[in-house]
Image (cartoon, helix red, strand yellow):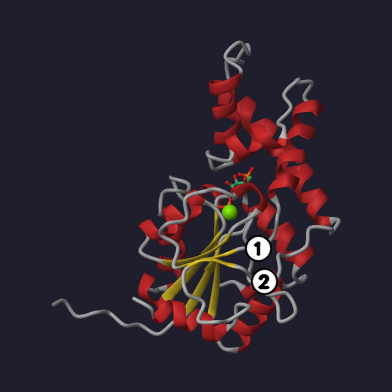
Amino acid sequence: MGEQIMSELRALLFDVDGTLAETEEVHRVSFNAAFADAGLDWIWSVDMYRQLLAVTGGKERILHYLDTYRPEFQRPAALAEFIAGLHQAKTRIYTETVARGGVPLRPGVRRLLDLARADGLRLAIATTTTPDNVTALLKASIAPDAESWFEVIAAGSMVPRKKPAPDIYFYAMEHMGLRPEACLAFEDSENGLLSARAAGLKTIVTVSDYTQGHDFTSAALLLDHFGEPGQPFQVLSGDAGGATYTDLALLQRVHADA
Ligand code: XBP
Ligand code: MG
């Protein structure tokens, strides 16, 4: 029987969109504003965007939209540059929107970050979104110095393959010098869960507005949100041991469970 590697919990690796905050609706509105500013009649409805989120990465998502829904669109010769320009415009709109505030953290996120920092747990970000988007959200929704709370902010095209590939999680752990056994990942989507699991990480999932109905079979614990003392979470699958909100004891329990 191989020796079971039992590491202590050293680090928490957080996804961003849908996990730290319900940002995808702001992304969707920003995409539509960029399309309109470019004189394009592309409008991504909520239902359309829910489908498009199967593809991670905004530039990849735009190409997927053209391939799948707009075969008639007269593609410019320099298509990659055209898409990159649209995406840069979208990112500017998104970051300006987020910087104005009004995109709150999801329940329990701030409390969990504060508990982790007080306990000496190391923190990292592992996200598909563009780094500028992370900066805008952390500064506006957590604290002006919040970027320094995270040892690594692994984001977007820092890796060759986006989620569901594990690359972004490997990148974060490599920069922290940690093995997956010493970490927990936090995600909101099927692609994110697949990515974290492929990197060998136990993962807690908090379902978000756009990821209801995804396959979360391999989640160590599935919740509707992290909960607060006065706002109990709902356990959708897994064993929270009777806890009604996420605290370090629950994280330690999930991490220790086989
Ligand atoms: C979510 C994504 C991103 C965002 C849009 O990332 O897949 O593509 O939807 O951001 P995660 P960009 O859940 O891993 O945080 O347009 O910058 O890609
Ligand atoms: Mg996400």
**Numbered badge on residue 39:** none
Q: Name the residue under label 2.
A: 109
As rendered, which of 233 and 20 lies closer to the eye?
A: 233
Say which amino acid is labelled 1: Leu
Mark 2 sits near ligand 2, with its Cβ under 8 Å away: no
> Quick one: SS at disc 1?
loop
Name which residue lies at 65% across and 36% down.
49
Task: State the residue lying farthest toward the left.
Answer: 1
Q: Position of residue 111 (x, y in %)?
A: 69, 79
Name which residue lies at 70% across and 77% down.
228
Image quadrant containing the C terminus? bottom left
The reply to whether discs 2 and 1 touch (Cβ–Cβ < 8 Å) is yes
**Numbered badge on residue 20:** 1
Name which residue lies at 49% across and 77% down.
11
Q: Where is residue 64 in the image (x, y as percent from the top left)?
A: 54, 28
Q: Residues within 10 Å of mark 1 (few under 14, many from 20)?
A: many
**Apparent side of residue 135 relative to residue 119 in the rendered image (left or right):** right
Q: How many labels does the image show?
A: 2
> Quick one: SS at disc 2?
helix
As rendered, which of 37 and 221 lies closer to the eye?
A: 221
Q: In which quarter of the image is residue 99?
A: bottom right
